[in-house]
Image (cartoon, rainbow, N blue to C red):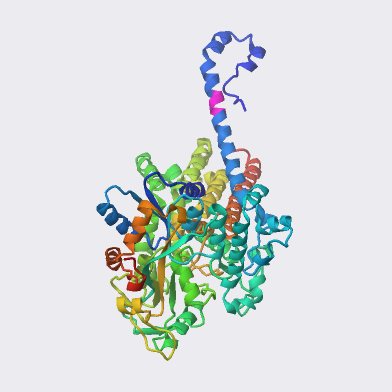
């Protein structure tokens, strides 16, 4: 199994004349849609999309096994160092979409809103019962993403401020799985992308205990009023930022490219950050 | 390695008086070739096994030698000091080989040192004064012993390899693997041994012709399919029945794991029962024992070494099974012996985290360490099983 994984990681080197994109699993579906549409507009372009995770994407960028690295977080200093060692330049960064982190509970759960400090207390294990939130006396089941996901890291960094998840936190393989687990578990809570499903409800979130809770929507995420959102990025070796690679990167950041974002549960870039 | 059944061409001179031997010798050269070819193939399997071990072990050598440091805050040479530091010190500091270091121009080196300073600046303010930030979390002490991390009120075994401070305690994963394996064996061993005894001793021949292939067909069901069934049906049914809170836990994972181990344990045990000479049970029957008594009191003890081998193989299968556990155990890395708690196994950890672990980094090395330990555990259990079987065999008088 390890051999297979490694083969998968080292394979997929860029073919001449085609663009390869590798990285964040969160962005795979979105990127595939972008690639499909772009290739329909430019029949001569060939774009190949791979997942694997943000870290894997950066590793591939350093090894020149991919042209574009999809990343659901900013590049780390360590990864910058590796790029410098590999191609003597820092990779170029393009924000390409916004992702709002949603909180799900079971639809019969009376809770409608949460503030970030309480959310952190729940996920670090300081609060373990819904009764502490004026709910019924029932233990809280925590659902999280697997620690290889960018969403997990983002949640740990932004919401838990670097503290550890409670050891009881169950980790699942994707947003859809988290949503389904919450829909099945009356006393569960989970987080993930803007995915909707039967049986689960989305919570409004406030920054502090006293501030007003905001429901996630395009307006609130794009304006920054919704407190847990992040940019999604594409990174590219500056020497490779030509031809189809450059064309694709410019197009996805244009109004046409951003229109696709909305259909897939993400949020478009604020107009100021778009390409013309 | 020449097997005794096939007389080899080289050993022929000693038995030259055997009539017809020389004719046979000439006719058998393709056999000789085939034998050597098979030997080469089996040798290559051994070689492959060795290669896998070397491959996994190689990745964790820096960890074994204590050369890996995963501390959040590490010493930094300021980029401004680039020209003042001896070049050899700088090369060591950057962890580069001589050739790579020589190929770097000054601007690149400076940029690299700057990124190191940046890494230090990336440390959130609340962690700057945290004593944990200077702890090398991949030292042996922190891999196996509990540590009072900031934010935990007492020493704890923590596996949280992603985050600001990477915590790599392996104990919760070992306990998790053992826990689901034991449940799996508790489920699979009685079932498959019972079925094997029934099929080999008690069942009428027409029934045996149906049951044996049916159970062995179970082995052909991909474990991911069993995982889906456990996830969608078993987890929910058990929760309704037993009324516990979390649908994904060690109990469900263990039961599903049992399904995957049944065909293997059944096959090996059934072979062991069938290999007990017919005369044993016939003698018992002749002395007036019932078929059940003959099976339970004569055949089962006589086949004990084979049965033990089956259980040991089942243990290895359960420890190594990945997909089922990954899907239905809930994967929470907590240290607990309760079956109703969600649990994280070694194999599921490797499968889930390998893709994101940066090649050559501390996390990557620890995952390889886990793989090697898993390899060692199954190897030692197999060895121990073999040893027990040898002892029992000599005690019971030589039935396989």
Q: Where does residue B119 sit, x and y in percent of width and height?
A: 58, 68
Q: In this view, does B126 lie to the left or right of B266?
A: right
Horizontal arrangement in the rendering, residue B171 relative to residue A59 (left or right): right
| Quadrant of the drawing holding the C terminus of chain B | top right
* Quarter-of-image position of residue B373: bottom right
Residue at the outermost left position:
A40
Vertical order, B215 against A97 (above or below): above
Q: Does the magenta stretch include residue B347?
A: no
Could you tell me which residue is drawn at 54 percent across and 48 percent down? B313
Between B170 and B139, the one lying in front of the other is B139
Tell me the quarter of the image containing the N terminus of chain B: top right
Q: Nearer the viewer, residue A227 or A224?
A: A224
**Observer-nearest of A44 and A194:** A44
Please state the extent of the stretch shown in magenta in the rendering: B35-39
- Residue B3 vs A93, above or below: the answer is above
Image position, residue B121 (x, y; %): 59, 72
Q: Is residue B294 left or right of residue B386?
A: left
Q: Which residue lies furthest to the bottom in this view?
A: A210
Q: Residue at position x 49%, y 68% from top?
A: B332
Is B37 one of the magenta-colored residues? yes
User: In the rendered image of this protein, does residue B281 appear above or below residue B228?
Assistant: above
Residue at 63% x, 8% y is: B17
Depth order, front residue of B134/B205: B134
Magenta span: chief secondary structure: helix
Q: Is residue B266 above or below residue A178?
A: above
Expressed as whole percent of the image width and height from the top left, the position of residue B233 reads 34, 63
Note whether residue A17 is visible.
yes
Examine the image and state in which quarter residue A231 appears.
bottom left
Residue B88, picture quadrant: bottom right
């Amino acid at each position: 199994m390890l051999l297979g994984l490694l083969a998968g990681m080292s394979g997929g080197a860029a073919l001449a004349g085609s663009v390869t994109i590798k990285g964040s699993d969160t962005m795979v579906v979105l990127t595939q849609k972008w690639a499909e549409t772009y290739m329909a507009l430019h029949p001569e372009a060939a774009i190949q999309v791979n997942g694997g995770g943000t870290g894997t994407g950066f590793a591939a960028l350093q090894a020149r096994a991919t042209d574009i690295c999809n990343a659901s977080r900013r590049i780390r200093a360590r990864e910058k160092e590796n790029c410098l060692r590999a191609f003597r330049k820092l990779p170029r960064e393009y924000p390409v979409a916004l992702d709002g982190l949603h909180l799900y509970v079971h639809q019969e759960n009376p809770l409608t809103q949460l503030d970030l400090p309480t959310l952190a207390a729940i996920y670090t294990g300081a609060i373990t019962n819904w009764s502490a939130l004026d709910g019924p006396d029932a233990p809280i089941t925590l659902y999280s993403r697997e620690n290889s996901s960018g969403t997990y890291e983002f949640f740990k960094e932004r919401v838990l401020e670097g503290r550890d998840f409670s050891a009881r936190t169950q980790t699942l393989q994707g947003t859809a799985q988290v949503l389904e687990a919450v829909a099945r578990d009356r006393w569960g809570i989970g987080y993930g992308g803007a995915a909707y499903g039967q049986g689960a409800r989305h919570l409004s979130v406030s920054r502090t205990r006293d501030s007003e809770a905001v429901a996630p929507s395009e307006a609130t995420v794009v304006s920054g009023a919704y407190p847990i959102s992040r940019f999604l990025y594409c990174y590219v070796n500056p020497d490779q930022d030509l031809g189809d690679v450059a064309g694709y990167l410019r197009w996805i950041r244009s109004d046409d490219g951003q229109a696709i974002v909305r259909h897939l549960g993400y949020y478009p870039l604020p107009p100021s950050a778009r390409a013309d | 390695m020449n097997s005794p059944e096939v007389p080899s061409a080289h050993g022929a001179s000693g038995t030259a008086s055997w009539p017809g031997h020389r004719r046979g010798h000439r006719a058998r050269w393709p056999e000789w070739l085939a034998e050597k070819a098979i030997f080469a193939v089996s040798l290559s399997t051994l070689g492959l096994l060795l290669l896998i071990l070397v491959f996994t072990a190689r990745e964790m050598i820096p960890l074994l030698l204590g050369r890996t440091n995963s501390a959040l805050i590490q010493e930094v040479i300021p980029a401004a000091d680039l020209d003042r530091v001896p070049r050899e010190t700088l090369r060591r500091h950057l962890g580069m080989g001589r050739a790579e270091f020589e190929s770097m121009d000054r601007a690149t080196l400076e940029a690299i040192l700057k990124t190191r300073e940046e890494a230090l600046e990336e440390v959130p303010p609340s962690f700057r004064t945290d004593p944990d930030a200077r702890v090398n979390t991949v030292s042996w002490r922190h891999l196996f012993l509990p540590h009072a991390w900031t934010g935990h009120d007492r020493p704890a075994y923590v596996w949280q390899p992603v985050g600001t401070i990477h915590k790599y305690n392996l104990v919760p994963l070992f306990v998790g693997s053992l826990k689901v394996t034991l449940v799996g064996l508790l489920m699979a061993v009685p079932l498959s041994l019972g079925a094997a005894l029934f099929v080999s001793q008690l069942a009428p021949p027409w029934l045996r012709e149906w049951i044996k292939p049916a159970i062995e067909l179970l082995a052909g069901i991909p474990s991911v399919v069993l995982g889906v069934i456990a996830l969608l049906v078993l987890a929910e049914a058990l929760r309704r029945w037993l009324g516990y809170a979390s649908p994904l836990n060690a109990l469900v994972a263990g039961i599903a794991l049992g399904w995957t181990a049944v065909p293997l344990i059944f096959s090996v045990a059934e072979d062991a029962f069938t290999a007990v000479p017919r005369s044993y049970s016939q003698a018992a029957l002749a002395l007036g024992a019932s078929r059940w008594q003959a099976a339970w009191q004569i055949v089962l003890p006589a086949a004990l070494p084979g049965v033990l081998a089956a259980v040991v193989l089942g243990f290895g299968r359960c420890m190594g099974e990945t997909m089922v556990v990954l899907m239905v155990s809930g994967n929470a890395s907590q240290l607990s012996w309760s079956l109703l708690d969600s649990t994280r196994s070694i194999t599921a950890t490797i499968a889930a985290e390998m893709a994101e672990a940066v090649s050559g980094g501390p996390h990557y090395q620890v995952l390889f360490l886990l793989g090697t330990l898993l390899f060692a555990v199954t190897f030692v259990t197999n060895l121990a099983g073999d040893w027990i079987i040898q002892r029992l065999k000599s005690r019971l008088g030589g039935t396989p």
